[in-house]
Amino acid sequence: MSPRGVAIEGLRERLFAAAERVLARDGAAALTSRAVTEEAECAKGVLHTHFAGLDEFVAELVLYRFRTAAALSENLPSRAGTGSVGENLADVAATVLSLDPGLVGLAVTRPLAARRVREAWQAGAPGFTAIQEAVSGYLRAEQELGRVAKSLDVEPVALALVGTLHHLLMTGSADAAPGSRAQVERLVHALVRTV
């Protein structure tokens, strides 16, 4: 337990990691501020000191995880010409699908959290749109290298991929990830004709 009144380095990330462990182990119904702080080995009130409440905490955790996924997808265009097109897109998809469905469910079913996430995305916080733009940029880069057909309309393909990720994330479960990756790979092969 950290001493009272002493700043804890990396506290937000520590609380986020603790919340994800609680979700993975005990499910969404077990996610309370007390469960998070106990898992993080912090004082009970520390979550409410840094967040307005559990809804804001959940929203910030979702936004944090999407920032992470979007940051990884930003590098996708630089991978053009390496590996296979399908593997590169499947890797980005796996990053998005690594979000805990219980967390996503909480962010959707808790109205204050849902509103906070929606408002942040509308204000430009990285989310599905950033991932879609990275996929489009990657496919255009592969077209320039001749690895993807010039006739491919990349924007609808990127939208279809991200829409599928959204669907799988919203309707999936934590143990469905391997099957979800296989579905994404099949979709990529159906949409993208590599040269």
Image (cartoon, rainbow, N blue to C red):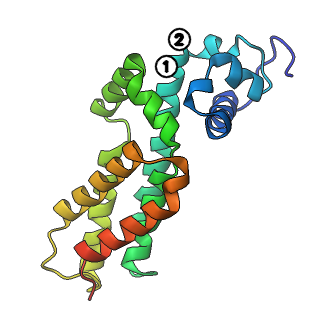
Above or below 32: residue 186: below
Residue under the point 34% across and 72% down: 186
Q: Residues within 10 Å of mark 1 (few under 14, many from 20)?
A: many
Query: Horizontally, is 20 left or right of 132 in the view?
Result: right
Q: Quadrant of residue 143?
A: bottom left
**186 left or right, relative to 177:** left
Q: Are marks 1 and 2 in contact (CB under 8 Å)?
A: yes
Amino acid at the residue labelled 1 = Glu
**Quarter of the figure with the C terminus:** bottom left
| Residue at the spot 38% in from the left edge and 29% down from the top edge | 108
- Left or right: residue 135 versus residue 2 is left
**Tag 2: residue type?**
Ala
Image: 17 above or below 163: above
Q: Quadrant of the N terminus?
A: top right
Nearer to us in this view, 26 or 6: 26
Q: Quick one: SS at disc 2?
A: loop
- Kindly identify which numbered label has been placed on residue 56: 1
Nearest the camera: 161 or 106? 106
Q: Does any portion of residue 92 appear in the rendered image?
A: no
Q: Is residue 64 above or below residue 84?
A: above
How far is mark 1 from mark 2, CA to CA?
6 Å
Residue 178 visible to the viewer: yes
* Residue 66 point in image, percent of width and height: 45, 42
82 or 45, nearer to the observer: 45
Residue ID at (62%, 37%):
20
Label 2 neighbour load within 10 Å: few <14, some 14-19, many 20+: few
Please tell me which residue lies in front, 181 or 123: 181
Tell me: 53 left or right of 160: right
